[in-house]
Image (cartoon, rainbow, N blue to C red):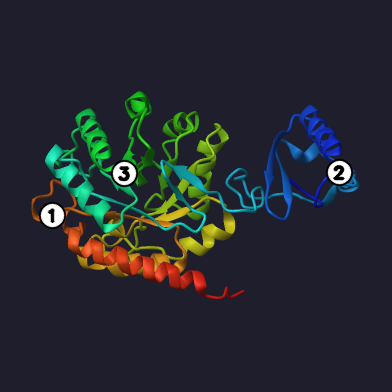
Amino acid sequence: MIVILKNNPDQEQLNNLINWLKTMGMEVNISKGTTQTVVGLVGDTSKIDMDLIAALDIVEDVKRVQEPYKKANRKFHPEDTVIKVGDTQIGGGNLTIIAGPCSVESEEQVCTIAKLVKDAGATMLRGGAFKPRTSPYSFQGLGEEGLNLLREAREQTGLPIVTEIMKAEDIDLFDDIDVLQVGARNMQNFDLLKVLGSTDKPILLKRGMMATYQELLMSAEYIMSEGDPNVILCERGIRTFETQTRNTLDVSAVPVLRKLSHLPIILDPSHSGGKRDLVAPLSMASVAAGADGLEIEVHNHPEKALSDGPQAMLPDAFATLVENLHTLHEAMGKMKPIN
């Protein structure tokens, strides 16, 4: 249930309303926007008299929310969420470019690529220390050593780190990592999501390859229900019948999720297309659709990469892409909305 308040509600009346709702066993969430304030109720609202609340002087309207996700729901939080990461942010009109190698392979490799992507305009560094691979014989990552190499790359460039966590019991290893990524295979690892929700870190949550929008938002709800509101939704391509791409990029995820949720949305064109020459057009399509950012794989020697070399962009091509993306993003910001 949500209670929409009139402009400039009397604070004493609002406090009385909140206290009464809490005595009814409700969890109360206040969202203050530029034009309205929304009081969101989580719990068994069947015993709440909507007409009684609607009759209060400070109340504009009362609505029941049918969707099972509450905290991730735009109805509870009408304005877009903006997540601060270091000296930058995700959302709020900012175009976030997360770039780097699929896997951390060595200090020279990750630090060299970090400097190259920063010079090209990347705002965050991605890199896998722990790698979930389909084959048990594939490179699984350097583990804790890889995290240390990412920290060294951050020290040299100042770029915040984005890297994947696979197990709840590893949480202490990621204590100073800037953004924790949940991979597609772990989107419904609910024990991991609950542990991540007990932190206050930004969590980049990737959509499962067969997951619906509601299932993605319910996974975000697991994190948020534990107390962490800093969730970033990531569309990374879904599995379809098509064989010409690694996955199928669902560009419609941007407008659909934007309507359903207030959380920022980024897209992963590298895992979607699975081919280097597809990354640029898929990136441009994502920005045109209104994405808040992109996560792009870049490698200076992709032919030698220990994982996902065929989809990694070369640094020079990445630099040109970033320039084009900012031009497109600026142009999109000047366009009139179509209702």
Q: Is residue 131 left or right of residue 306?
A: right
N-terminal of the pair, mark 3 or mark 1, is 3
Label 3 to label 1, Cα distance in Å? 22 Å
Q: Quadrant of residue 153?
A: top left
Residue 60 showing in the rendered view = yes
Residue under the point 57% across and 35% down: 225
Labels 1, 2: front one: 1
Q: Which residue bears the numbered disc 3?
A: 159
Circle 3 — which element? loop
Q: Which residue bears the numbered disc 2?
A: 53
Q: Quadrant of residue 150?
A: top left
Q: Amino acid at mark 1?
A: Pro
Q: Which mark is residue 302?
A: 1
Label 3 to label 2, Cα distance in Å? 48 Å
Q: Amino acid at mark 2?
A: Ile
Residue under the point 63% across and 44% down: 70
Question: Pointer 1: residues within 10 angstroms few (<14), some, or many (20+)?
Answer: some
Seen in the picture, residue 164 relative to 59 is either above or below; the reply is above
Q: Which mark is residue 256?
A: none
Q: Is residue 262 left or right of residue 251?
A: right
Tell which of 179 and 66 is nearer to you. Answer: 179
Q: Quadrant of residue 174?
A: top left
Labels 3, 1: front one: 3
